[in-house]
Amino acid sequence: MRIGILGLGRIGAFHAETLSGLDVVESLVLTDPFADAAKSAAERFGGEVVDSPQALLAAGVDGIVVAAATDAHPGLILAGVEAGIPVFCEKPVARTMAEGVEVLKAVEGKDVPIQIGYNRRFDAGFVTARAAVQSGELGKLHTVRSTTLDPAPPPAAYIAASGGIFRDCSVHDFDIIRWVTGREVVEVYAVGGNRGAEYIKEAGDADTTGAVLTLDDGTIAVVSNSRHNARGYDVRMEIHGFTDSIAVGLEDKLPLRSVEPGVTFPAGTPHDFFMDRFTAAYRAELTAFTEVVAGTRPSPCTIADALEAGWIADACTLSLHEHRPVTIAEVRTA
């Protein structure tokens, strides 16, 4: 099949490399507002460069991958749907939840599949954890712990436009908690602090946060996030039931040092970047999209799925600012 990629920055170029390695993908069509970015990707991974999204949509593509700036997501999703072309779009659907809801309304009733990029759903550990929950082997759940710690904060320009740590970082934890447990979040309580980069505080954001989520069956989920984890990129989950407990991410590249006498775990070189930690997951995610394009599977992460994680992020942001518990119903507008 022939796949178009809109946006050839860091993640777009990474997707181009991944797609170029899939047997089912015969050719790529690339476009980016910065022509040199598209040209560079074409030289490295192959593909035809066109000068606009309109030209790409008219180039006979079977599916499109939207990896452009967030502000462009709504328009590109809708353009793909209008052209009848299946769409993969990196999260978020839009910069604000209100815009995201408008996109959802605009595509309702359209017979064009849309997949939003939440790669942890395709990580082998998280897939196994979900299966364990679904099988009942853990028993009734009582506690979930989810962690995302970045090795260093992004630049100030990114922080200023990101929507805050809950919307650009924690949202991955929120999505995977929903996906693994099969439950919905009903209430949150969030706290945060600033012990590092001053520009994060100046932007009105926190660099380290904690959130307690109450799920609709009474399970408690604890989410921990930080922009500062000098040892590496740390993504983990613990799921505790009345019969058994399991963990995702306890492997030799875990960026955590044990100080127990005689303990050598973890023994490997720590993960230092999200692309390192989730290389296989990204490949599985885009492989799934080719199956969506082929019509052999439904979207594994719809716009509605993505918006649910966004409501949790909005509730946590409000909770942090107002120092109180917030229900999802309080922030949900649709």
Image (cartoon, rainbow, N blue to C red):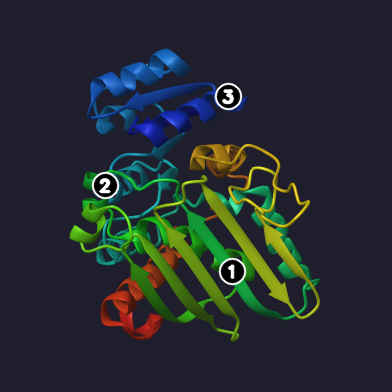
Instruction: State the image quarter where residue 139 is shown.
Output: bottom right
Outermost top residue = 43
Under circle 2, the secondary element is helix
Q: Give the spatial CA distance, label 3 vs label 2.
A: 30 Å
Vertical side of 56 occupied by 314: above or below: below
Looking at the picture, tell me which residue is in the foreground, 192 or 123.
192
Q: Give the spatial CA distance, label 1 vs label 3.
A: 35 Å
Which residue sits at x=23%, y=60%? 201
For label 2, the crowd category at 10 Å Cα-Cα, with few meaning under 14, some 14 to 19 and many 20 or more, is few
Do callouts 1 and 3 mark residues in contact (Cβ within 8 Å)?
no
Precedes in sequence: disc 3 or disc 2: 3
Which residue sits at x=37%, y=74%? 191
Q: Position of residue 102 (x, y in %)?
A: 27, 63
The image's mark for residue 145 is: 1
Q: Which residue is mark 2?
A: 158
Q: Position of residue 296 (x, y in %)?
A: 63, 45
The image's mark for residue 21 is: 3
Residue 278 in sight: no
Q: Position of residue 220 (x, y in %)?
A: 57, 80
Under circle 1, the secondary element is strand
Precedes in sequence: disc 1 or disc 3: 3
